[in-house]
Image (tube, helix red, strand yellow):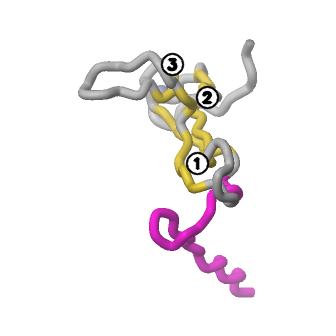
Amino acid sequence: MREPAAPCPKCHCVESLVVRHLADLGHIDGAPRFVNVREIALVDHPAPIPNLTPPVISVGRLSATVCRACGFTELYTRGAEMIPVDGDRVVLLESQPAPAPYR
Ligand SMILES: [Zn+2]
């Protein structure tokens, strides 16, 4: 399946791959472990209700766009608005709005 895409910003190739679910192979001591393969998420946090199953909730699932020619890769986070800000592991930064142009 082909969808329109912007050219690669590094080599200007017009073919890229969208990888919608990045897999964490769960490496232990350098050897891949083929059980418990799970999708990569940015943040795990305790469930809001004690004794809930699962006890940890993962948010911020990653996807990637990969240039087929040079391998340049961009990561994107799905559900970024769901990532809890705790001021420790996740800090919210806000940029100042650009000033209005002088007229
Ligand atoms: Zn490229």
The image shows residue 14 at horizontal and vertical percentages of 60, 23
Q: Is residue 102 left or right of residue 22?
A: right
Residue stretch rendered in magenta on the structure = 80-103
The residue carrying pointer 3 sits among few (fewer than 14), some (14 to 19) or many (20 or more) residues within 10 Å by Cα, namely: some
Picture quarter with the N terminus: top right
Please tell me which residue is depicted at 35% across the width and 27% down the height of the picture.
Answer: 27
Q: What secondary structure is marked by label 1? A: strand
Read off the residue under disc 2.
Answer: 21
Q: Nearer the viewer, mark 3 or mark 1?
A: 1
Residue at numbered disc 3: 68
Question: In the rendered structure, which amino acid carries the disc numbered 3?
Answer: Arg
Mark nearest the camera among 1 and 2 is: 1
Q: Is mark 3 within 8 Å of ligand 1?
A: yes
Query: What percent of the width, then of the height, locates residue 58?
Result: 60, 46
Q: Is residue 29 left or right of residue 49?
A: left
User: Which is nearer the eye, 36 or 51?
Assistant: 51
Q: Residues within 10 Å of mark 1 (few under 14, many from 20)?
A: few
**Residue occupying the point 70% across, 86% down:** 102
What's the residue type where badge 1 is placed? Val
The residue tagged 1 is 56
Mark 2: few/some/many CA within 10 Å (<14, 14-19, 20+) = some
